[in-house]
Image: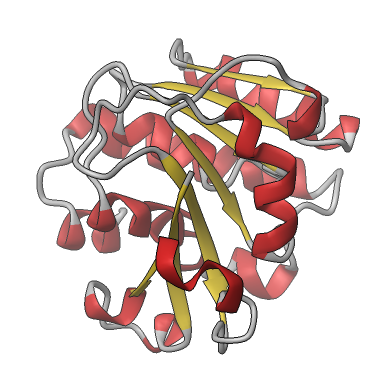
Amino acid sequence: MNALLKHYFPELTDVQLQLYAQHKQLLLEWNEKINLISRKDIADFELHHQLHSLALCKVLKFVPGTKIIDIGTGGGFPGIPLAIFYPDCEFTLVDSIGKKILVVQDVIEKLGLKNVHAFPRRGEELKEKFDFVTNRAVAPVSDIMRWTHKLISPKHLNAMPNGILCLKGGDLREELKEFKKYSIVFPIKDYFKEAYFETKSVVYIQG
């Protein structure tokens, strides 16, 4: 159970590993009712969804008290896996599709996660300030920056200045051209050896 997570994150506790196992089971049950994840991806849930989300943890270790907003969270990625990993950080998950947020809220409740809340909203509708914005292949970086730059707090807690952390795939040179001075691309294959991550990256953009 969770052999991949244990391999790459040996610091995970038994409680956290149990939460990841429960998380998978809940998503499998919900996916029978609402198509959140493709059937092909379900077979590799830990790899394609949980471990992929946790690639952010290899790039930056959030300090306790960090506030993160996950925009376009869909089925709760990367927000829920990150919230399990960082119980001392505060997560807000938003998506404009209400039925997806209903699923995410149910999963949060059943896992008993006290550090994460989900709302049917667009990121640009929020007034609160956050240290980091996360998302997984939601939209081009320029759109994400336009929607969320006002949400990023000017007060820095972490080793990296506050900003955006995106999980992206493919050739990003054109997409990041206008952010060249403010962005860093971290190839996930530098952290995880599985072929699935060969063309995937974590993109950091200073806010």
Task: Locate residue 119, reporting x and y percent.
Answer: 74, 20
Colour convention of the picture? secondary structure
Task: Locate residue 152, reporting x and y percent.
Answer: 52, 31
Name the residue furthest top. Answer: 114
**Residue drawn 51% across the image and 67% down it:** 48
In the rendered structure, the answer to whether residue 177 lies left or right of residue 124 reads left
Q: Quadrant of residue 183?
A: bottom left
Task: Locate residue 88, reporting x and y percent.
Answer: 28, 18
Name the residue furthest left. Answer: 11
Q: How many marks?
A: 0
**Residue drawn 72% across the image and 44% down it:** 72
In the rendered structure, the answer to whether residue 24 lies left or right of residue 184 reads right
In the rendered structure, the answer to whether residue 195 lies left or right of residue 33 reads left
Nearer to us in this view, 173 or 16: 173
Name above or below for residue 89 compared with residue 101: above
**Residue drawn 47% across the image and 14% down it:** 112
Task: Locate residue 107, reporting x and y percent.
Answer: 61, 27
**Residue drawn 28% across the image and 50% down it:** 57
Q: Quadrant of residue 174?
A: bottom right
In the rendered structure, the answer to whether residue 33 lies left or right of residue 60 reads right
Name above or below for residue 112 compared with residue 30: above
